[in-house]
């Protein structure tokens, strides 16, 4: 639940509740509410990411499946992100990740029905697609955060320090070091 107007305080607060037998119960620590894989695994086509929702940092998974297409125009199916964003990220990955996806169907899902409206999870989407297409598992203790530009550069999301602090508190590591500013294809090859 998100407040759009609050006469007595901030509108940046987000309340998370679960419906239980006795009614709505607040989720006090939602950090792992939207993840399904074990942190000690390496999973193909799944990449964790984190983003700010109000003043809370939420972690969730981007799941991708890449298969050979039987159609002349390959399918791009997106659940939880805009299809146009998936098409844009696929083009960036093809160009800067040096991978041919023109004959592949790509399916992307955000875990637990979460909806993404901001680009801070772009890098996670790219890594999940890359992992699925190359059959390279991703370490689930690593988290990908960052907006990817058309030139292939990765940029910090707004209020990154809050995200970084929460990732460290959970015992995760960032997949991308913003200080090194590596090109996208080098990030993908290091996974």
Image: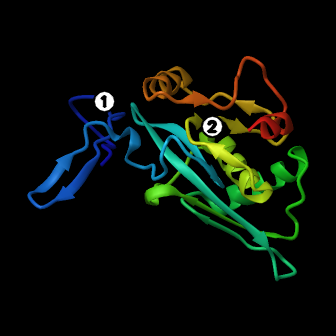
Q: Is residue 100 left or right of residue 6?
A: right
Q: Which structural element holds mark 1? A: loop
Which quadrant is home to the C terminus?
top right
Measuring from the top left, give residue 22's x and y in whole percent: 8, 58
Residue 70, which numbered label?
none
State the residue in front, 4 or 189.
189
Q: Which residue has dot 2 on it?
A: 144
| Residue 159 drawn above or below residue 143 | above
| First of labels 2, 1 by sequence position | 1
**Mark 2 or 1, which is nearer the eye?**
2
Q: How does the figure colour the protein chain or chains? A: rainbow
Q: Which structural element holds mark 2? A: loop
The crowding category of the residue bearing disc 1, from other C-alpha atoms within 10 Å (few below 14, some 14 to 19, many at least 20), is few
The quadrant holding residue 184 is top right
Q: Which residue shows up at 66% across the image and 55% down it?
A: 45
Q: Which residue shows up at 40% across the image and 36% down it?
A: 54
Measuring from the top left, give residue 52's x and y in whole percent: 47, 35
Measuring from the top left, give residue 92's x and y in whole percent: 82, 49
Residue lying at the far left of the rendered structure: 22
Q: Which residue has dot 1 on it?
A: 10
Q: Is residue 81 left or right of residue 136?
A: left
| Residue 84 drawn above or below residue 34 | below
Q: Which residue shows up at 65% across the image and 27% down it?
A: 156
Measuring from the top left, give residue 163's x and y in whole percent: 50, 28
């Amino acid at each position: 639940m998100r407040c759009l107007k609050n006469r007595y305080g901030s509108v940046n607060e987000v309340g998370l509740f679960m419906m239980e037998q006795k009614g709505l119960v607040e989720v006090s620590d939602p950090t792992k509410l939207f993840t399904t894989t074990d942190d000690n695994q390496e999973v193909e086509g799944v990449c964790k990411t984190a983003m700010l929702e109000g003043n809370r940092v939420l972690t969730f998974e981007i799941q991708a499946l890449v298969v050979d297409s039987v159609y002349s125009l390959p399918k791009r199916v997106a659940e939880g992100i805009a299809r146009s964003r998936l098409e844009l990220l696929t083009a960036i990955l093809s160009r800067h990740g040096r991978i041919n996806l023109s004959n592949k169907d790509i399916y992307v899902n955000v875990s637990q029905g979460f909806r993404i409206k901001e680009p801070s999870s772009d890098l996670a989407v790219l890594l999940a697609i890359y992992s699925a297409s190359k059959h390279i598992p991703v370490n689930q203790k690593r988290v990908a955060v960052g907006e990817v530009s058309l030139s292939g550069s990765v940029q910090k999301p707004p209020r990154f320090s809050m995200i970084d602090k929460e990732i460290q508190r959970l015992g995760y590591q960032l997949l991308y070091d913003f200080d090194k500013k590596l090109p996208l294809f080098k990030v993908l090859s290091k996974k």
